[in-house]
Image: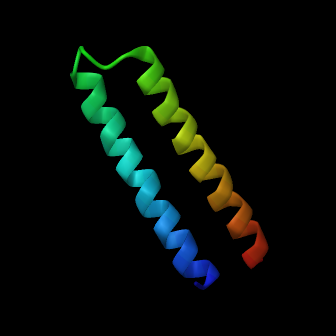
Amino acid sequence: MSLDGHLTTLQQKHAAIEAELEAASLRPATSDNEIRDMKRRKLQLKDEMERLRAKQH
């Protein structure tokens, strides 16, 4: 997979986690641990996207 393709995939996963976080915030049954894990995954994806963007330049 090309760098651009991989970056696009990561962006889609990042957006999906963002939507999942928004939905979870509306559900009172969502635990703080679940929210924290989603935020951690989102941050890991963001870091990976930034690393790939740095490689492109």
**Left or right of 12 on screen, residue 45:** right
Name which quarter of the figure residue 51 lies in. bottom right
> In the picture shown, does residue 25 fall above or below 54?
above
Q: Residue at x 50, y 25 (%)?
A: 36
**Location of the C terminus (image quadrant):** bottom right
**Location of the N terminus (image quadrant):** bottom right
Q: How many numbered markers are drawn?
A: 0
Tell me residue 28's x, y (percent): 24, 14
Display coloring:
rainbow
Name which quarter of the figure residue 27 lies in. top left
> In the picture shown, does residue 13 fall above or below 3?
above
Towards the viewer: 9 or 53: 9
Tell me residue 26's x, y (percent): 22, 23
Tell me residue 33's x, y (percent): 47, 19
**Left or right of 53 on screen, residue 1:** left
Q: Residue at x 36, y 51 (%)?
A: 16
Tell me residue 49's x, y (percent): 62, 60
> In the picture shown, does residue 40 fall above or below 7?
above
> In the picture shown, does residue 34 fall above or below 19?
above
Q: Residue at x 36, y 34 (%)?
A: 21
Q: Residue furthest bottom?
A: 2
Q: Residue at x 73, y 77 (%)?
A: 56
